[in-house]
Amino acid sequence: MPMSRGLSAKASKARRPDPITPGPGLAQPFRGSTPTNVSRGRRPEPAPSFGGCGGSCDCRKCAATSQSTSPTAPTKGRTCSSSTGDNAALPPPRSPIARLFRGPGVRERSINVESIAEWEHLSDSTYAGRTLNLPAAPNPELIAAACRDPASAFAPGYAMWAIDNLLIQGDLESAADLCDWWKRHWEERRFMGVPILSYVTRQAAYCWSGLGRPARAEHELLASAKASIEAGQSPADAYYELGRILERFEAPARAASAFEAAASYAGESELASFARRDAQRLNTDLTWMRPNPGDLASELLCALRSRDAARIHSLASKTHFSIGRGSSHFQFVEPAIVLPLLVADLRLSRIFGDASRLEGEGGRRYLRVRGWAGVTFQEDLVFLLIRTAHGWEWSGIITMLEVQGTRELYARISPPGISETNHQLEIRIEAPWREGVGYQAGGAVAYSFIRASGFGGLFLSTRECGFGPGGFYYNTVDQHEGSDAFAVDFTRWQRLNFITPQNYSDDRHDGVVLACADGIVTMEDRGTIASIVTGDRSGLGNRITQILFDSTTGSPSPYTAIYLHLRGPNEIFVSPTMRVRQGWILGGMDTTGNATYAHLHFEIHDRRMPRPDQILGASVRPSPMSEQTLNDEDSTKCIVSNNRVVLITPADCPSVPPAFFEREYPGVCDLVAATEARAILCAPGLALCRDRCVDLQTDPRNCGRCGLGCSTNDCRGGRCVF
């Protein structure tokens, strides 16, 4: 990659990073990077640029770098000042945002009104590039801003966003080089007490693993673990990711050691359970594994139809077997507890299914078997097939309808816990999906009771969000309890129209997750994770942690939101330390992590209510949400959002980058900016698909079918392959 790998002797002595020449990995400056707020109908003024280069400055070098790479740098009358010049004369900002960035290694005077304005501007530009499918376009501007003042509070964040941009673009080699460059300048930096190095080294490990160099990936993750330990943080995530990489590259002994280390640091968390079971799997014969999901589904369905108990037991995972409700989460359970009940109910049922019509994508498939009429299992059961480093395994059952026997089974697995009590929010939030679209809150437990009441389920199916076997609500044992007691799983179901009745079927609309309020993406409590592949069940999956702002004051509040089970890999549009605005597209709903079906797991924590097991504080009711309450009795309630999607388009509209639309279309910016609509408007001949305007005839990402959900690597010849 055409990028400087080190510092010259003179520059090293002055502690200045080399200017980075834009190349294939960094693309070209983002044309007209001053953003336009699409849905809110206003065009903000360009953010003021730095008046100086910071530190010990070479004026000519700084001016040349800025003018050649940053579209916002002034071309005339530009002055250069050191840390005792113009920047130092600026008064400290009154904004309480500044306190989030202060820390060791940060030049205090770098947090000023001007730098905060540029931080907001570059956040907008980075988000615009990612949503326009030009993720690396803002990189020259980001690198230039980081180079101008390496001691700035915001510099390591800018370079980190550039790394994520390259990962979204798929340029692993350039991203790995940029990670190395980042570590030479900001290795000691922290954000809110969390080492930024731990995030960057994990991204570097992802790059090296994808490039087939596990030794480099191992080196990066061990460095990440060391940084976390030195900062008093848990290195469990780094060790767990190391175990997964070593397992994939056939180093079972070292992988088992990494998993055991992760379990020891993770305490009693869900990650610890995964790590212990992964280590155990490496010490078994793996006779239940099959090379592909089709063969496994056929063999399993055959065993069920023939009521062959021995064969059913032999096909079940010995280490990762689990059971779950509707669209919620799994609970690990010993096969000896569940399988005898399953076999007994087979004698009372006439089941049917089709192994050639599996649902799911990525590393996860679902085999739906209907016709159950037993004591424990009735109507539909879904059998979960998961891809591992060793093949495919049958790793669980999903129940849709519960009867008394089912409830007794769940009570046996998870005895009742202690119900938490808490208050509602003191700030305003919007539902984290599109305006006018409804999602069902919880409903996994209430679904069966409502179905048994007669026409109650059919009546609820006519709602905007439909009705179905949803996820967990407040105070649900094993998952939504303790510090997460007031988390909510949100799902959406097909509406009943009495013409083509398809109620109780999943319908995520577009599955877009939006920011519920303005805020900052943080790195606390495992922070933001974007590297998990769709369908991957390990850990908690892709996630975003966001400090929420109070809309009345514009200041950080004590509340932190967590969005879980997002789509991946690298399909998240924000990065740590980035300024986020309400209505920004964060990512897509998915099944990554310990989820049964695709849903959004959403929770809010209050730092004023400390808990020993949660650094963010106790969870609180995410209510009111879009001016609708979610009280204890509101499981299955339909929440219709008021949240408008915010897109940012280049300021030099109507010229839109051809790489985005596959063609020039002069009127697209006018179409978008002239409306207050809740949806993105597309040019004639283009269609909205997964939050992008695409030509479905030529766009390979969707294989000619909007919503098919193929990843780029799964598209072959105009269709999805697995």
Image (cartoon, rainbow, N blue to C red):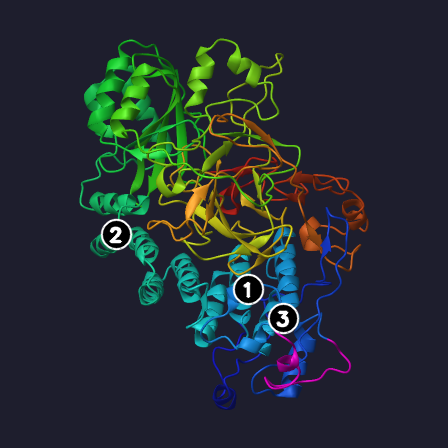
Does the magenta run of residues contain 78?
yes
The mark nearer the N terminus, 1 or 3, is: 3
In which quadrant will I find the C terminus?
A: top left
The mark nearer the N terminus, 2 or 1, is: 1
* Residue at the spot 77% in from the left edge and 56% down from the top edge: 43
The image shows residue 117 at horizontal and vertical percentages of 66, 66
Q: Is residue 655 above or below residue 65?
A: above
Q: Is residue 20 visible?
A: no
The residue indicated by pointer 1 is 162
Foreground pick, 144 / 217 = 144
* Residue at the spot 42% in from the left edge and 17% down from the top edge: 448
The residue indicated by pointer 2 is 259
Foreground pick, 362 / 499 = 499
Q: Residues within 10 Å of mark 3 (few under 14, many from 20)?
A: many
Which element type, helix, strand or loop, lies under badge 3?
Answer: helix
Tell me which amino acid carries mark 3: Ser
Magenta residues, as a range?
Answer: 74-92
Which quadrant of the structure image shows residue 297?
top left
The image shows residue 9 at horizontal and vertical percentages of 48, 90
Real-space CA distance between mark 2 and mark 1, rounded to the nearest whole angstrom? 31 Å
The mark nearer the N terminus, 3 or 2, is: 3
Real-space CA distance between mark 1 and mark 3, rounded to the nearest whole angstrom? 18 Å
User: Which-is-in-front pick, marks 3 and 2?
Assistant: 3
Q: Is residue 532 left or right of residue 376?
A: right
Does the magenta run of residues contain 34?
no
